[in-house]
Image (spheres, rainbow, N blue to C red):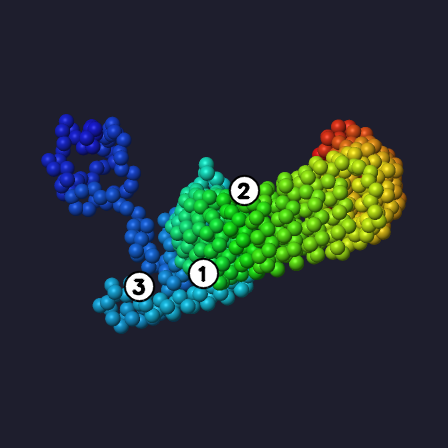
Amino acid sequence: MYSFSGDLNFCLGGSIYPNPKDSSHFLSLGHHVDYIPPRKRSRIGAPFLFSGEIFEEQQPPSIEVLPDECLFEVFRRLPGGEERSTCACVSKKWLMLLSSICGDEICTKKATQTLETEEKSTPGKAGENLACNKKDELVGSNEVEAEAVDQEIESDGYLSRCLEGKKATDVRLAAIAIGTGHRGGLGKLSIRGSHSASRVTNIGLRAVARCCPSLRVLSLWNVSSLGDEGLYEIAKGCPLLEKLDLCQCPAISDKAVLAIAKNCPNLTSLTIESCPNIGNGSLQAVGSCCRNLTSVSIKKCPLVGDQGIASLLSSANCSLTTLKLQALTISDVSLAVIGHYGKAVTNLVFSGLENVSERGFWVMGNGQGLQKLRSITVTLCQGITDVGLEAVGKGCPNLKKVCLRKCAFLSDNGLVAFAKAAVSLEILQLEDCHRITQCGFLGVLVNCGEKLKSLSLANCLGFKDLVVKFPPMACCLSLRSLSIRNCPGFGNFGLTMVGKLCPQLQHVDLNGLNGITDEGLLPLIENCEAGLSKVNLSGCVNLTDKAVSVIVKLHGVTLEELNLDGCMCITDSSLVAVAENCSFLRELDVSKSAISDFGVAALACAAQLNLQIISLSGCFFISDKSLPYLMKLGRTLVGLNIQNCSTISSSTVDLLVERLWRCDILS
């Protein structure tokens, strides 16, 4: 009996070979020979080759052993994009290597044939011909670019991808870059990361830059791991870039934006938000290099000051039409520059400019440079006073839309003066302007001219419903839409005056006016000669069925949307009136009202009614008895809200969901 010792030697009391490495002593053992298994587990799991004097482990052949330089030369000679995509699926190494190849490094068919001819004619220079010569590189680059343009026209060049959260990684970006490269290239890329799981680095952007030269829109949001190097690559590889959005990118500085400005002349839109390392220098470069720039938005960038805004606007190439400045430390100087050089500006947005005073708005309005301005939005700026707003109205003759939010120093006098000066005004929105009262509101209606189409008030707490004798006033025949939301002091007298002054109203939104009653609403409804199409009375708790009945009888043939959410005094009588008079009603909201199963049945039995959306949320008097009527209404419904209807059982809800499969049901 042979024994097998722990030192991996056959032995009979000792080794049978004086030299274990001598292959000539290795004898074939017969089947009758028995031996003891080794006491130690063998560490070799691969087959052996008995060559020479030692055991050699056989390595499986693999192309992975090739150095990156060789793989690079192979990959750049692949015939097409599909082949490159297939190779990218082999391993992560191949994917990242393929994504590092620029378009001008790819050898086209013609360049490859030229290279093969040269190698055959000069075999001694094979080492020198590992790469295409400079001339062939230029030819190959031109053909690749032409092919990309053709494919881009077919796909409009706007293949879009969005990576969010943990899905935003370098590997995914590389895969997207390779996969879309042969289909016209990626046109729009959006990366929305998070500080806790930000796994996109400059390597991922480099892959996009090298494989997607047709990229036109790039949006980076909350990606702290991306720095200047990634945008450098985008600037070099994506010269067609048109829109760049940078939000919460602390590692990106002026250097990267400067590279974009110099290498992307087609840039039309630039948004920079919460980027602490981007300042005046980059804005100066953008203003001087990007002649097609039309939109700039800057928010919460502490390094941006008057110098940057002045450089951007005063450039000879400036063609800005939209400018948004929010939460910046700029002063009156910036507004003066805008008022003088903003000759092409049509849309202005100012928000949170604490260092801008009344003088800034006055100078901007008198600068005579905003002749084309059509829209301005001002939020939380103490400088928008009566004097400043009037100056803007006088200096901007084509101003059509004005939105003022949280303007604490604006009063009735300034608002009326502005209404007189802004002869082209069509839309006026006031929100959280607490010094505006009933007098200012009515003064706007009288002095706004003949172009005002929409007037909106929201959360203005200065209103008091005072009965005041006004002299005869001209009507505002142009007003079509009136919205008064959550202004608790607005009451019946104000509504009565609106009814007299605005006979052409079509949209009425009185959300949250709990002080109005049927007495104030009826004069408004009865004087609307054009016919109401949208009526929102949500939160008007004192309205009754009488008001609803008048609305549907006078305007039933034009009414399309009716919102009675929270009108607790509304009962089945209103739904019966709706069923009898409304032939074009599409949306009905009677949530938290006093309607019951009878009202739902009345709606279902109306022959001419074709409701698409109905909300019954919080209607406690609706029960399972409404099931057949809801089924009947469901033939045209696309939306049904029965939330908080405690008397409707879960089995009824399940049946509705099963039968009304085309309807979106909230339960």
Q: Earlier in the sequence, mark 1 or mark 2?
A: 1
Residue picked out by circle 2: 354
Along the line of sight, the residue nearer the viewer: 527 or 573? 527
Describe the element under mark 3 as helix, strand or loop.
loop
Residue at position x 49%, y 52% in the image: 309
Image quadrant holding the N terminus, namely top left
Residue picked out by circle 3: 131
Along the line of sight, the residue nearer the viewer: 326 or 511? 326
Badge 1 crowding class, 10 Å Cα cut-off, few under 14, some 14 to 19, many 20 or more, is: many
Badge 3 crowding class, 10 Å Cα cut-off, few under 14, some 14 to 19, many 20 or more, is: some
Q: Amino acid at mark 3?
A: Ala
Q: Earlier in the sequence, mark 1 or mark 3?
A: 3
What distance separates the C-alpha of mark 1 from that of mark 3? 35 Å
Q: Is residue 354 left or right of residue 572?
A: left
Image quadrant holding the C terminus, namely top right
Residue picked out by circle 1: 289
Position of residue 651 relative to residue 583, above or below, is above
Residue at position x 81%, y 52% in the image: 474
Residue at position x 20%, y 28% in the image: 5
Q: Amino acid at mark 2?
A: Glu
Q: Amino acid at mark 1?
A: Cys
Do callouts 1 and 2 mark residues in contact (Cβ within 8 Å)? no
Q: Position of residue 71 (x, y in %)?
A: 33, 55
Work out whether residue 163 can be spotted.
no
Q: Report the mark closest to the observer, 1 or 3.
A: 1
Q: Position of residue 384 (x, y in %)?
A: 61, 46
